[in-house]
Amino acid sequence: MNRLVKVAVVLALVSGFALCAESVRSATSASQDKTHAPIKVMREYKGVKLGLSRDEVHKVLGNPATTSENQDAYDLPGDTSLTVHFDNSAVKAIQISFLDAKTAPAMKDVVGESDVEVTQMENGATHARVNVSAEKFWVSYYKSKDGATTLVTISSQ
């Protein structure tokens, strides 16, 4: 009988350890999934994204209004302009300027809604920036006090 009690105690302990280990593994998986879930931020605009070649940008947007060695500028509908900056003929940064509040995206559509630090500037403008370290880029949002100007920048780190 004494032996049966010892076996029961050992089985109870092993079962307890197994349940604890499963709980820890589940909690770790859940936190890893949350950590590795894609951050919902603006990654591209009108098909232009970081890393594209200059030729690919031209295929998407056509010929730029102005061009130089390291950048192309486009005039888009709705008082919107787009400047694409290149490094070794690959897109390094995208700057979008919206001069009509009706065509500008909402802040949450640019920098997302979680873990965003929004700064109210002295001039009344609003600014927010999110670093997406895992993907080696950042995105920022600037809106003037009167809402007439919104600037969005997507850039490699």
Image (cartoon, rainbow, N blue to C red):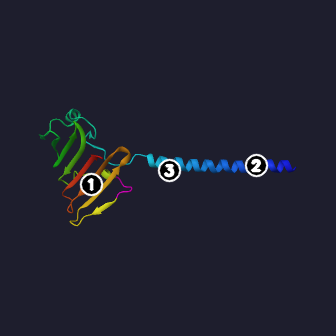
Q: Which residues are magenta?
A: 112-116
Name the side, left or right, on which 2 lies relative to 13.
right
Provide residue 153's location: percent of width, then percent of height: 25, 49
> Label 2: which residue?
10
Q: Considering the numbered disc 2 on the image, is that residue within a helix, a strand or a loop?
A: helix
Q: Considering the numbered disc 3 on the image, is that residue within a helix, a strand or a loop?
A: helix
Q: Which tag, 2 or 1, sits closer to the chain's start?
A: 2
Q: Amino acid at mark 3?
A: Ser
Q: Amino acid at mark 1?
A: Tyr
Q: Residue at x 17, y 35 (%)?
A: 62
**Tag shown at residue 45:** none
Q: CB atoms at circles 2 and 1 under 8 Å apart?
A: no
Provide residue 75's location: percent of width, then percent of height: 15, 44
Depth order, front residue of 57/106? 57
Provide residue 71's location: percent of width, then percent of height: 17, 41
Q: Give the Cα separation between the discs numbered 1 and 3.
A: 28 Å
- Using the rendered image of the protein, determine whether residue 101 is visible from the camera's viewpoint: no
| Main secondary structure type of the part rendered in magenta | loop
Q: Give the Cα separation between the discs numbered 2 and 1.
A: 60 Å
Depth order, front residue of 67/48? 67
Depth order, front residue of 60/29? 29
> Label 1: which residue?
141
Q: Amino acid at mark 2?
A: Val
**Tag shown at residue 31:** 3
Provide residue 78's location: percent of width, then percent of height: 17, 48
Q: Residue at x 22, y 53 (%)?
A: 151
Q: Considering the numbered disc 1 on the image, is that residue within a helix, a strand or a loop?
A: strand
Of badges 3 and 2, the one in the foreground is 2
Of badges 2 and 1, the one in the foreground is 2
Q: Residue at x 19, y 34 (%)?
A: 58
Q: Which tag, 1 or 3, sits closer to the chain's start?
A: 3
